[in-house]
Image (spheres, grey):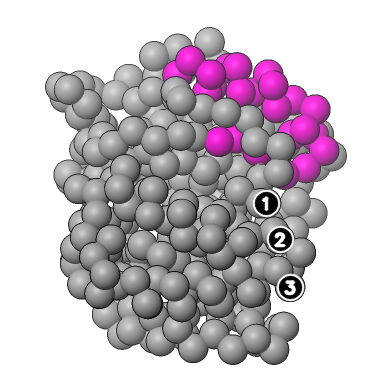
Amino acid sequence: MSKVHILGAGAIGLTFAHALSKQHDITILSRNQKCREWLYTEQQTSVIKAKTLSIAQAHSTNEKIDNCFVCVKSYQLTQALTDVLPLLSDTANLIISHNGMQDLTKLTKQLKVHQALYFVSTAKGALKLSDHHAKASGLGDTFLGACNLSAKAKIEQVYQAFFATLLPPSFIHNDINQLRWQKLAVNIAINPLSAMHQVPNGQLRQPRYASTILSLLNEACAVAKCEDIDLPLSNALQSAYQVMTRTQNNFSSMAQDVKLGRKTEIDAICGYIVELGKKHHIATPANMAMLQTIRDKH
Protein backbone atom coordinates (compact mmCIF):
# COMPACT_ATOMS: atom_id res chain seq x y z
CA MET A 1 0.00 0.00 0.00
CA SER A 2 1.29 3.44 -0.99
CA LYS A 3 0.17 6.93 -0.05
CA VAL A 4 -1.34 8.63 -3.08
CA HIS A 5 -2.50 12.25 -3.35
CA ILE A 6 -4.94 13.23 -6.09
CA LEU A 7 -5.20 16.92 -6.97
CA GLY A 8 -8.44 17.60 -8.80
CA ALA A 9 -11.81 16.13 -7.87
CA GLY A 10 -13.29 16.17 -11.36
CA ALA A 11 -14.68 13.12 -13.12
CA ILE A 12 -11.26 11.64 -13.92
CA GLY A 13 -9.74 12.52 -10.54
CA LEU A 14 -12.57 10.73 -8.74
CA THR A 15 -12.34 7.81 -11.18
CA PHE A 16 -8.68 7.37 -10.27
CA ALA A 17 -9.38 7.89 -6.56
CA HIS A 18 -12.08 5.23 -6.58
CA ALA A 19 -9.90 2.69 -8.41
CA LEU A 20 -6.70 3.32 -6.48
CA SER A 21 -8.44 3.31 -3.07
CA LYS A 22 -8.88 -0.46 -3.40
CA GLN A 23 -5.19 -0.93 -2.63
CA HIS A 24 -3.77 2.43 -1.58
CA ASP A 25 -4.14 5.19 1.02
CA ILE A 26 -5.80 8.05 -0.88
CA THR A 27 -5.89 11.76 -0.07
CA ILE A 28 -7.92 14.06 -2.33
CA LEU A 29 -6.55 17.59 -2.52
CA SER A 30 -9.56 19.78 -3.19
CA ARG A 31 -10.62 23.40 -3.08
CA ASN A 32 -14.03 22.12 -2.01
CA GLN A 33 -13.12 22.03 1.67
CA LYS A 34 -16.71 21.39 2.78
CA CYS A 35 -16.78 18.01 1.07
CA ARG A 36 -15.85 15.17 3.38
CA GLU A 37 -17.48 12.36 1.43
CA TRP A 38 -16.87 11.54 -2.23
CA LEU A 39 -19.17 9.20 -4.16
CA TYR A 40 -18.55 7.08 -7.23
CA THR A 41 -21.09 5.10 -9.23
CA GLU A 42 -20.33 2.07 -11.36
CA GLN A 43 -23.01 -0.63 -11.11
CA GLN A 44 -23.83 0.84 -7.70
CA THR A 45 -22.88 3.92 -5.72
CA SER A 46 -20.17 3.71 -3.08
CA VAL A 47 -18.22 6.09 -0.88
CA ILE A 48 -14.61 6.55 -2.01
CA LYS A 49 -12.21 5.63 0.77
CA ALA A 50 -10.19 8.85 0.90
CA LYS A 51 -9.17 11.69 3.17
CA THR A 52 -9.72 15.25 1.99
CA LEU A 53 -7.29 18.14 2.42
CA SER A 54 -7.20 21.64 1.03
CA ILE A 55 -3.93 22.81 -0.49
CA ALA A 56 -3.44 25.12 2.51
CA GLN A 57 -3.92 22.20 4.90
CA ALA A 58 -1.49 20.08 2.90
CA HIS A 59 1.13 22.82 3.17
CA SER A 60 0.62 23.10 6.92
CA THR A 61 1.13 19.38 7.60
CA ASN A 62 4.77 19.41 6.41
CA GLU A 63 4.22 15.88 5.08
CA LYS A 64 5.96 15.28 1.76
CA ILE A 65 4.01 13.71 -1.12
CA ASP A 66 5.52 10.63 -2.79
CA ASN A 67 2.85 9.93 -5.41
CA CYS A 68 0.71 12.71 -6.84
CA PHE A 69 -1.90 12.50 -9.58
CA VAL A 70 -2.83 15.91 -11.03
CA CYS A 71 -6.16 15.61 -12.84
CA VAL A 72 -7.26 19.14 -13.72
CA LYS A 73 -8.39 21.11 -16.76
CA SER A 74 -5.52 22.20 -19.00
CA TYR A 75 -5.99 25.88 -18.08
CA GLN A 76 -5.74 24.95 -14.37
CA LEU A 77 -2.46 23.04 -14.74
CA THR A 78 -0.05 25.91 -14.11
CA GLN A 79 -1.74 26.89 -10.83
CA ALA A 80 -2.10 23.26 -9.76
CA LEU A 81 1.61 22.63 -10.24
CA THR A 82 2.51 25.85 -8.42
CA ASP A 83 0.44 24.55 -5.50
CA VAL A 84 1.81 21.02 -5.45
CA LEU A 85 5.50 21.22 -6.45
CA PRO A 86 6.69 22.48 -3.02
CA LEU A 87 4.92 19.51 -1.38
CA LEU A 88 6.69 16.80 -3.39
CA SER A 89 9.39 14.57 -1.93
CA ASP A 90 12.77 14.51 -3.68
CA THR A 91 11.92 11.18 -5.34
CA ALA A 92 8.21 11.82 -5.99
CA ASN A 93 6.16 10.42 -8.85
CA LEU A 94 4.14 13.22 -10.47
CA ILE A 95 1.43 11.88 -12.80
CA ILE A 96 -0.57 14.41 -14.80
CA SER A 97 -3.67 14.00 -16.94
CA HIS A 98 -5.64 16.58 -18.93
CA ASN A 99 -7.24 17.14 -22.31
CA GLY A 100 -5.53 19.15 -25.01
CA MET A 101 -1.85 20.02 -25.17
CA GLN A 102 0.51 21.89 -22.90
CA ASP A 103 4.26 22.35 -23.34
CA LEU A 104 5.71 20.26 -20.51
CA THR A 105 9.29 21.51 -21.03
CA LYS A 106 8.98 24.26 -18.43
CA LEU A 107 7.56 21.85 -15.86
CA THR A 108 10.30 19.29 -16.49
CA LYS A 109 12.92 21.94 -15.73
CA GLN A 110 11.25 22.75 -12.40
CA LEU A 111 11.58 19.20 -11.12
CA LYS A 112 14.46 17.88 -9.05
CA VAL A 113 16.72 15.31 -10.67
CA HIS A 114 15.05 12.25 -9.09
CA GLN A 115 11.46 13.48 -9.36
CA ALA A 116 9.65 11.50 -12.06
CA LEU A 117 7.11 13.06 -14.43
CA TYR A 118 4.49 10.92 -16.19
CA PHE A 119 1.56 11.69 -18.44
CA VAL A 120 -1.63 9.60 -18.38
CA SER A 121 -3.98 9.49 -21.34
CA THR A 122 -7.26 7.77 -20.61
CA ALA A 123 -10.35 7.05 -22.67
CA LYS A 124 -12.35 6.02 -19.61
CA GLY A 125 -15.65 7.83 -19.64
CA ALA A 126 -16.87 9.56 -16.49
CA LEU A 127 -19.44 12.20 -15.67
CA LYS A 128 -19.78 14.51 -12.68
CA LEU A 129 -23.27 14.20 -11.21
CA SER A 130 -22.55 16.81 -8.52
CA ASP A 131 -19.56 18.51 -6.87
CA HIS A 132 -18.77 15.35 -4.92
CA HIS A 133 -20.23 12.55 -7.06
CA ALA A 134 -18.92 11.02 -10.31
CA LYS A 135 -20.32 8.23 -12.43
CA ALA A 136 -18.53 5.86 -14.82
CA SER A 137 -19.92 6.34 -18.32
CA GLY A 138 -17.76 4.12 -20.50
CA LEU A 139 -14.76 1.84 -20.73
CA GLY A 140 -11.56 2.80 -22.51
CA ASP A 141 -7.83 2.23 -22.59
CA THR A 142 -5.46 4.06 -20.23
CA PHE A 143 -1.86 4.73 -21.24
CA LEU A 144 1.04 5.75 -18.98
CA GLY A 145 4.10 7.40 -20.48
CA ALA A 146 7.37 8.76 -19.10
CA CYS A 147 8.20 12.43 -19.62
CA ASN A 148 11.71 12.51 -18.11
CA LEU A 149 14.64 10.20 -17.39
CA SER A 150 13.63 9.50 -13.79
CA ALA A 151 10.20 8.41 -14.99
CA LYS A 152 11.69 6.12 -17.64
CA ALA A 153 13.74 4.39 -14.95
CA LYS A 154 10.71 3.75 -12.71
CA ILE A 155 7.84 3.38 -15.15
CA GLU A 156 7.41 -0.39 -14.79
CA GLN A 157 7.25 -0.07 -11.00
CA VAL A 158 4.70 2.77 -11.16
CA TYR A 159 2.63 0.97 -13.77
CA GLN A 160 2.44 -2.21 -11.68
CA ALA A 161 1.58 -0.29 -8.49
CA PHE A 162 -1.18 1.95 -9.84
CA PHE A 163 -2.38 0.82 -13.27
CA ALA A 164 -1.88 -2.85 -14.13
CA THR A 165 -4.67 -4.29 -12.01
CA LEU A 166 -6.46 -1.21 -10.66
CA LEU A 167 -7.13 0.70 -13.88
CA PRO A 168 -7.60 -1.93 -16.60
CA PRO A 169 -7.24 -2.01 -19.52
CA SER A 170 -4.00 -0.05 -19.15
CA PHE A 171 -0.65 -0.05 -20.91
CA ILE A 172 2.78 1.56 -20.89
CA HIS A 173 3.33 3.76 -23.94
CA ASN A 174 6.91 4.30 -25.09
CA ASP A 175 6.29 7.57 -26.95
CA ILE A 176 3.89 9.61 -24.86
CA ASN A 177 4.31 12.74 -27.01
CA GLN A 178 3.07 10.82 -30.04
CA LEU A 179 0.14 9.55 -28.01
CA ARG A 180 -0.70 13.04 -26.74
CA TRP A 181 -0.89 14.24 -30.35
CA GLN A 182 -3.13 11.33 -31.29
CA LYS A 183 -5.44 12.15 -28.40
CA LEU A 184 -5.34 15.86 -29.32
CA ALA A 185 -6.59 14.96 -32.80
CA VAL A 186 -9.51 13.02 -31.29
CA ASN A 187 -10.28 15.98 -28.99
CA ILE A 188 -10.23 18.35 -31.99
CA ALA A 189 -12.63 16.16 -33.98
CA ILE A 190 -15.13 15.60 -31.16
CA ASN A 191 -15.09 18.15 -28.36
CA PRO A 192 -15.79 21.50 -30.07
CA LEU A 193 -18.48 20.19 -32.41
CA SER A 194 -20.22 18.27 -29.64
CA ALA A 195 -20.08 21.40 -27.49
CA MET A 196 -21.35 23.72 -30.22
CA HIS A 197 -24.30 21.51 -31.17
CA GLN A 198 -24.87 19.93 -27.72
CA VAL A 199 -24.99 16.41 -29.12
CA PRO A 200 -23.54 13.12 -27.84
CA ASN A 201 -20.36 11.93 -29.50
CA GLY A 202 -22.05 9.32 -31.66
CA GLN A 203 -24.13 11.91 -33.54
CA LEU A 204 -20.95 13.44 -34.96
CA ARG A 205 -20.77 10.44 -37.33
CA GLN A 206 -23.62 12.05 -39.33
CA PRO A 207 -22.54 13.17 -42.84
CA ARG A 208 -23.32 16.83 -42.14
CA TYR A 209 -20.34 17.07 -39.76
CA ALA A 210 -17.87 15.23 -42.00
CA SER A 211 -16.40 18.18 -43.92
CA THR A 212 -15.79 20.20 -40.74
CA ILE A 213 -14.09 17.25 -39.04
CA LEU A 214 -11.96 16.67 -42.14
CA SER A 215 -10.87 20.34 -42.23
CA LEU A 216 -10.06 20.46 -38.50
CA LEU A 217 -7.95 17.30 -38.65
CA ASN A 218 -6.27 18.17 -41.94
CA GLU A 219 -4.93 21.37 -40.33
CA ALA A 220 -3.88 19.51 -37.17
CA CYS A 221 -1.98 16.88 -39.16
CA ALA A 222 -0.20 19.52 -41.23
CA VAL A 223 0.92 21.31 -38.07
CA ALA A 224 1.96 18.01 -36.46
CA LYS A 225 4.22 17.26 -39.42
CA CYS A 226 6.06 20.55 -38.86
CA GLU A 227 6.55 19.49 -35.22
CA ASP A 228 8.13 16.20 -36.43
CA ILE A 229 5.09 14.20 -35.34
CA ASP A 230 3.94 11.41 -37.65
CA LEU A 231 0.15 11.84 -37.65
CA PRO A 232 -1.35 10.75 -40.99
CA LEU A 233 -4.78 12.21 -41.72
CA SER A 234 -6.27 8.77 -42.43
CA ASN A 235 -5.16 7.50 -39.00
CA ALA A 236 -6.47 10.60 -37.22
CA LEU A 237 -9.87 10.25 -38.90
CA GLN A 238 -10.07 6.54 -38.15
CA SER A 239 -9.24 7.09 -34.46
CA ALA A 240 -11.74 9.92 -34.11
CA TYR A 241 -14.61 7.91 -35.63
CA GLN A 242 -13.70 4.87 -33.52
CA VAL A 243 -13.96 6.99 -30.36
CA MET A 244 -17.27 8.47 -31.56
CA THR A 245 -18.60 4.93 -31.95
CA ARG A 246 -17.21 3.62 -28.66
CA THR A 247 -18.52 6.62 -26.69
CA GLN A 248 -21.62 7.24 -28.80
CA ASN A 249 -23.93 7.98 -25.87
CA ASN A 250 -21.45 10.18 -23.97
CA PHE A 251 -21.34 13.95 -24.00
CA SER A 252 -17.78 15.28 -24.21
CA SER A 253 -16.35 17.22 -21.29
CA MET A 254 -16.43 20.38 -23.44
CA ALA A 255 -20.11 19.86 -24.22
CA GLN A 256 -20.78 19.59 -20.50
CA ASP A 257 -18.68 22.70 -19.77
CA VAL A 258 -20.55 24.78 -22.35
CA LYS A 259 -23.93 23.55 -21.12
CA LEU A 260 -23.06 24.54 -17.54
CA GLY A 261 -21.48 27.86 -18.52
CA ARG A 262 -17.98 26.84 -17.42
CA LYS A 263 -14.67 27.74 -19.01
CA THR A 264 -13.59 25.18 -21.63
CA GLU A 265 -10.25 23.73 -22.73
CA ILE A 266 -10.61 25.05 -26.28
CA ASP A 267 -7.36 27.05 -26.03
CA ALA A 268 -5.39 23.84 -25.39
CA ILE A 269 -7.16 22.02 -28.23
CA CYS A 270 -8.01 24.11 -31.32
CA GLY A 271 -6.05 27.04 -29.86
CA TYR A 272 -2.91 24.92 -29.69
CA ILE A 273 -3.17 24.19 -33.44
CA VAL A 274 -3.80 27.86 -34.22
CA GLU A 275 -0.70 28.97 -32.28
CA LEU A 276 1.54 26.35 -33.88
CA GLY A 277 0.05 27.24 -37.27
CA LYS A 278 1.26 30.83 -36.77
CA LYS A 279 4.70 29.55 -35.76
CA HIS A 280 5.02 27.42 -38.90
CA HIS A 281 3.13 29.81 -41.24
CA ILE A 282 0.34 27.31 -41.85
CA ALA A 283 -3.23 28.56 -42.27
CA THR A 284 -5.65 27.06 -39.74
CA PRO A 285 -9.02 28.68 -40.54
CA ALA A 286 -11.18 25.75 -39.39
CA ASN A 287 -9.50 25.55 -35.98
CA MET A 288 -9.55 29.35 -35.67
CA ALA A 289 -13.29 29.47 -36.40
CA MET A 290 -13.97 26.74 -33.84
CA LEU A 291 -11.74 28.47 -31.27
CA GLN A 292 -13.65 31.74 -31.64
CA THR A 293 -17.06 30.03 -31.61
CA ILE A 294 -16.40 28.14 -28.35
CA ARG A 295 -14.68 31.14 -26.72
CA ASP A 296 -17.83 33.16 -27.39
CA LYS A 297 -19.81 30.61 -25.37
CA HIS A 298 -17.71 31.10 -22.19
Query: In terms of secondary structure, where does tag 3 sit?
Result: helix
Q: Which residues are magenta?
A: 143-166
User: Which label sits on residue 258?
Assistant: none
- In three-dimensional space, the C-alpha distance between marks 2 and 3, rounded to whole angstroms, equals 7 Å
| Image coords of residue 5 (percent x, y) | 50, 31
- In three-dimensional space, the C-alpha distance between marks 1 and 3, rounded to whole angstroms, equals 14 Å
Q: Residue at x 53, y 19 (%)?
A: 164
Q: Residue at x 68, y 19 (%)?
A: 157
Using a 10 Å C-alpha cutoff, classify the residue at mark 1 as few (fewer than 14 neighbours), some (14 to 19) or many (20 or more).
some
Using a 10 Å C-alpha cutoff, classify the residue at mark 2 as few (fewer than 14 neighbours), some (14 to 19) or many (20 or more).
some
Query: In terms of secondary structure, where does tag 2 sit?
Result: loop
| Image coords of residue 235 (percent x, y) | 54, 55
Is residue 107 left or right of 240 when viewed as pictured? right
Residue under numbered circle 2: 229
Query: In terms of secondary structure, where does tag 1 sit?
Result: helix
Q: Is residue 285 above or below residue 252?
A: below
Residue type, numbered disc 3: Cys
Q: Earlier in the sequence, mark 1 or mark 2?
A: 1
Residue 67 in view of the camera: no
Residue type, numbered disc 2: Ile
Residue under numbered circle 3: 226
Q: Is residue 185 above or below residue 48?
A: below
Q: Nearer the viewer, mark 1 or mark 2?
A: 2
- In three-dimensional space, the C-alpha distance between marks 1 and 2, rounded to whole angstroms, equals 8 Å
Q: Residue at x 20, y 48 (%)?
A: 249
Residue under numbered circle 1: 177
